[in-house]
Amino acid sequence: MVAVLKPGTTNEQVENLTVWLEGRGLKVHISKGEFQTILGLIGDTSQIDTELLEGLEMIESVKRVTEPFKSANRKFHPDDSIIDLGGLKIGGPHFQLIAGPCSVESPEQILAIAQSVHESGASILRGGAFKPRTSPYDFQGLRMDGIEMLLEAKKKTGMPIITEIMNANHLPMFENVDIIQVGARNMQNFELLKELGMIRKPVMLKRGLANTMQELLMSAEYIMSGGNHNVILCERGIRTFETYTRNTLDLSAVPMLRELSHLPVIVDPSHASGHARLVKPMSLAAAAAGANGIMIEVHNDPVNALCDGAQSLTPEQFREVAKKVRRIREALAE
């Protein structure tokens, strides 16, 4: 349920109403926009008499929300959420390029790639320290050593870092990581999501291989219900009957998610396509579809990469993609 307050409602009135609603067992999310203040009521709202609520002088209108996701719902929060990374912003009109290798392999490798993509326009460095692999015999990542290498690259370039978490027990290792990524395989690891709801660090939540948009938003709800509203959604392709690409990139999810939710939406064309030659056209299409950012895998020696070399761009190829994406963004701004 959402209650839209009339202009001129005082902070004291909002506080008194909030206390009254919380006394009835509801959680109240307050969203203050430029022209309106909205109270999002979460919990069993069946006990609330909407006519009584609408009769209050400060209430302009009351609406029941039928979707199961509440905190992530744009009806609760009409304005775009903007994630602030120490001045670097994601969401709303702010667009960011995220780039780096699938896996951190060595200090020299991650630093060289970080410096290259930063010069080409990337603002956030990605790199896997913990790697979920289908085969137990494949490279699993350098774990804490990989995080340390990412932090050293951050120190040298100034770029915030994002890396994937596999287990809630690993959270202490992520203390200095700027954005924690939840991979597609863990999108419905609800115990992990609950733990991430207890912190206030930004979380990028990837859509599962066979999950609907509503299921993605419900997973975001798990994080937000714990109090962490710094959530970024990521479309990384879904599994269909198509075999020419690794996954099928659902670009319709970008405008649909932005319509349903106020959370930023990032697109990962590398995992979606599985082929380096498809990353450029899919990146341009994602920018045109209204994504808040694009995450691209970049490796300085893709042929010998320990993970996902086939879908990784070289630094030179990334430079060209970044240039074309900027042109798309400029065209959209006209």
Image: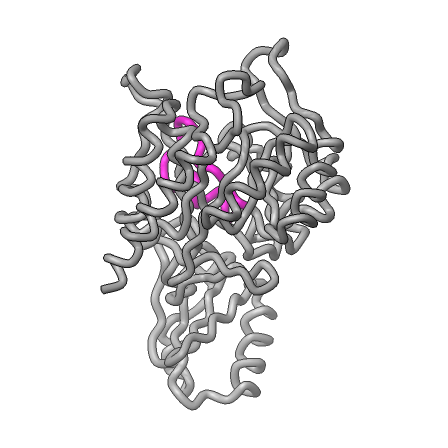
Is residue 108 visible to us here?
A: yes
Q: Residue at x 33, y 26 (%)?
A: 277
Which residue is depicted at the point 41% across and 72% down? 3
The one nearer the camera, 78 or 144, is 144
Q: Is residue 213 magenta?
A: yes
Rendering coords of residue 239 (x, y %) = 36, 23
Above or below — where is 6 with respect to 249? below
Residue lying at the far top in this picture: please name it.
137
Instruction: Identify the residue shown where x is 38% and y is 29%.
Output: 272
Q: The N terminus lies in which quarter of the figure?
A: bottom left
Residue situated in front as seen by the camera: 28 or 35? 35
Horizontal and vertical percent position of residue 167:
67, 32
Q: Which residues are magenta?
A: 204-221
Q: Nearer the viewer, residue 92 or 278?
A: 278
Query: Which residue corresponds to the image point at 49% horizontal and 57% vertical from the top-left?
Result: 44
Lateral position of residue 164 relative to residue 172, left or right: left
Task: Examine the image and state in which quarter residue 181 appears.
Answer: top right
Residue 260 relative to residue 226: left or right: left
Q: Is residue 90 magenta?
A: no
Q: Position of residue 78 (x, y in %)?
A: 37, 66
| Residue 328 on image: x %, y % | 27, 51
Q: Nearer the viewer, residue 210 or 132?
A: 132
As drawn, 299 above or below 328:
above
Relative to 308, does residue 85 appear above or below in the rendering? below
